Structures are given as C-alpha cells and as structure tokens.
Image (spheres, rainbow, N blue to C red):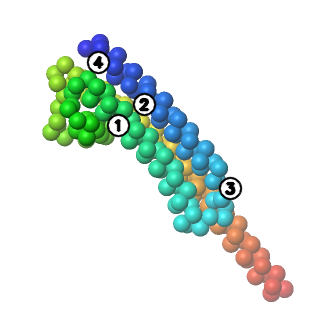
Amino acid sequence: MLVNLALGVATMALCLALQIALLTRALVYYSKHQAALDEASYLGTMTILCGVMFLLMFGNLGQVAIWAALFQSLGEFSDYNTAFYHSAVNFSTLGYGDIVMSEQRKLLGPIQAINGVLMVGMSTAAFMTTLRDAIKQNKHGWTAKRAEQIRTLVDSQE
C-alpha cells in the first residue's frame, strides 16, 4: 500500500508541475492577447478564449497520458491504448468499471481520480476567470465604441 501511495503522490506531483506549466502558458497567452480584446469582434474574442481552453485541455490530457504510462510500466495493461482509456476514465471520475486494475494496484485509481478532480477544477477556474475578464473587457470596449458613435452623432447635429 505504501508503494502505491508513494507512486500516486509522485505522479500527482508530476501532473501538478505539468498543470502549472500549461496554466501559466495559458495565462501568458491570454495576457499577450488581452489588448486585442478591446478591438476584438465576437469571433476574435472566441478565438482567444479557445486558445486558452486548448492549452488547459492539453494539460489535462497530458496528465491522463502520464498516468497511463505509469499503469503500463507497472504491467497493469498490455497496450498503451487500454491504459490511456482506463486513465481517462479514472481522471474524469467517470468510473465505468469495465476495466479494472489488479488487486495490488487498484488504490492508484482513486488517487488518480482525486488528482483529476483537482486538476480539472484548476482548469475550470482558470478558464472561467479568463472568460469573465474577456467579457468585462469586451463590454468596456463595446461601451466605449458606442459612446464614441453617440458623440459623433451629437456633434454632427450641432
């Protein structure tokens, strides 16, 4: 049991490092494109937000891949595709139960599920923060444009 806990915690630490790296990259990407939001159309705003979302999604899929590699290296699955599928089911806490690990290693499943809940939660929080900021900034930009249109209209009637 202690070996499984040690392996699980070490894998969680590796996943956290990957999550932080890609979360940081997503936020840097967003901040570099933030100025464009003032002038961005709806499609432009969505493109920027999709970039953030894909970076965060890639981080979660990378973590699924790390856990799958662990499962396969421990001899739990004969092929990587099955290990990846099982890992995705655990990480997402879906828990089909159609494929199970050996009695010796099955504690790794709930450890990975805890990891998945935390990391998907981090991704969701980061995405919602950027979404809220983009809406706020875009609304400000749209309001400024509308005010300028009104001023132009008033000036032309004087």
Q: Residue furthest bottom?
A: 157
Residue type at tag 2: Cys
- Callout 4: SS: helix
The image shows residue 144 at horizontal and vertical percentages of 71, 66
Residue at 55 percent of width and 56 percent of height? 48
- Callout 2: SS: helix
How far, Cα to Cα, is label 1 from label 2? Answer: 9 Å
Is 96 or 15 nearer to us in this picture? 15
State which tag comes first along the sequence, 2 or 4: 4
Q: Nearer the viewer, mark 1 or mark 3?
A: 1
* Residue matched to label 3: 35
Q: Which mark is residue 64?
A: 1
Q: Is residue 138 above or below residue 87?
A: below
Q: Pointer 3: residues within 10 angstroms few (<14), some, or many (20+)?
A: few
Residue type at tag 4: Asn
* Residue matched to label 4: 4
Residue type at tag 1: Val
State which tag comes first along the sequence, 1 or 2: 2
* Residue matched to label 2: 15
